Image (cartoon, rainbow, N blue to C red):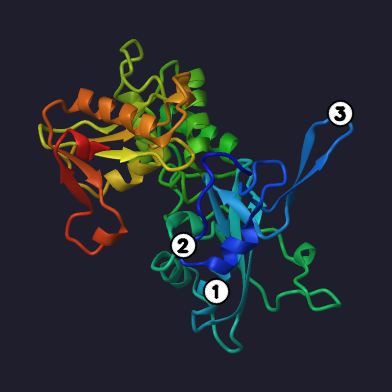
Amino acid sequence: MTGPGLARGYHNRPDLTADRFVADPFGEPGQRMYRTGDLVRWRSDSTLEYLGRSDFQIKVRGFRIELGEIDSVLMAHPSVYFAATLGHEAPSGETMIASYIQPVEGQTVDDWELRRHLSSRLPAHMVPGAIVVVDRIPVTPVGKLDRKALPTPSFERRTVPYAPPTNDTERTVVDIFEAVLGHEHIGVDDDFFELGGTSIVATRITIELEKRLGMRVPLQSLFLDPTPAGVARAADGMDAHSPDDSSDLLAPMITLRAGSDRAPLFFVHPGIGLSWGYAEFVKHLELDQPVYGLQLPSLSGGPSFDSLTELADDYANRIAAVAPTGPIHLPAGRSAASSHTPWRTVSLGADVT
């Protein structure tokens, strides 16, 4: 990978920078390219066929992660002797993380204790969707991990007692959850994301809901209450003939929560270009805090920009259209993580970009 958007290197990692950022044999003198780790082959018809990775990185929810980092955190737990983490295709078709755990002899591994341990040290997208306890991690005759000998993980976890549907809408929503997620016996109180759902799969849920119910249930309903019961309540409270402000799920500006006249909080999308994933964060804010998400304009047929500056200018204009007089809130960086408020307040103008 090369071009004007290429990074300078890894922060404070000159060894990794030298390994991954190499001279570009096809470019001008001094131009570099990035060794991504993706394996492809050049076919006779001049097309490139993707074969996989040369390392153990995988992409989950739009984030590229190194599985060894998860293993390191797991093996730091006193009850874990050895851990091996892999990417698996879940029934929904999405890539999910499964960790295989060999306990320390004489100790019992508690699933929820491990999850608390992981959640305190890793971002949410790196917490495994399945943790499988095995008596011994299988290895090949030469001592390497035997991935083929590991059992198939189950990504169906229930954190609440099973509750059956009580009305037609709940039955319809449960049927859609089971079909899209590839699970059986889903209860109305089961959590969509704990069953392996992602923000991308959530859009498939809303499409099926519109087909079956004849109305478009706002996507944020699924994020704010990700259970069949919650989605059914949202659907039953809607007028099938009323316009839906969230009809364009890929709009450059989405409303994650409408609120009072308080200064609104604006999230900018991660690498995937979508901001719906921030709806989980919204549940932890005060009820009258308005929250908006900026999404990549090109996803909905809008313009593509040649530079980050142009994109930032576009986002500043969209923010000003929502809050023309300011002030506004923007999420704080890591340097402010220890402050009491996880965002900073800015005035409209140069500060926005």
Q: Which residue type does callout 3 highlight?
A: Asp
Q: Nearer the viewer, mark 3 or mark 1?
A: 3
| Residue 72, picture quadrant | bottom right
Q: Which mark is residue 11?
A: 2
Alpha-carbon span between mark 3 and mark 1: 43 Å
Q: Which residue type does callout 2 highlight?
A: His
Compare marks 3 and 1 and give the one earlier in the sequence. Answer: 3
| Disc 2 packing (10 Å; few <14; some 14–19; many ≥20) | few
Residue 196 seen anywhere in this rendered image of the structure: no
- In the displayed structure, 347 sits above or below 10; it is above
- In the rendered view, does 325 fall on the left or right side of 101? left
Q: Nearer the viewer, mark 1 or mark 2?
A: 2
Q: Give x and y (percent) for residue 253.
A: 33, 27
Identify which residue is drawn at 21% across, 31% down.
258
Q: Give x and y (percent) for residue 9.
A: 52, 57
Q: Are marks 3 and 1 in contact (CB under 8 Å)?
A: no
- In the rendered view, does 23 fall on the left or right side of 196? right
Residue 184 seen anywhere in this rendered image of the structure: yes
Kind of element beneath mark 2: loop
Identify which residue is drawn at 44% across, 72% down.
113
| Disc 1 packing (10 Å; few <14; some 14–19; many ≥20) | few
The residue beneath circle 3 is 45
Kind of element beneath mark 1: helix
Identify which residue is drawn at 49% across, 84% down.
78
Q: Which residue type does callout 1 highlight?
A: Ser
Alpha-carbon span between mark 3 and mark 2: 40 Å
- In the displayed structure, 173 sits above or below 1; it is above
The residue beneath circle 1 is 72
Q: Among all residues in the image, which is located at the extreme front?
A: 29
Q: Give x and y (percent) for residue 23.
A: 66, 52
- In the rendered view, does 297 fall on the left or right side of 15? left
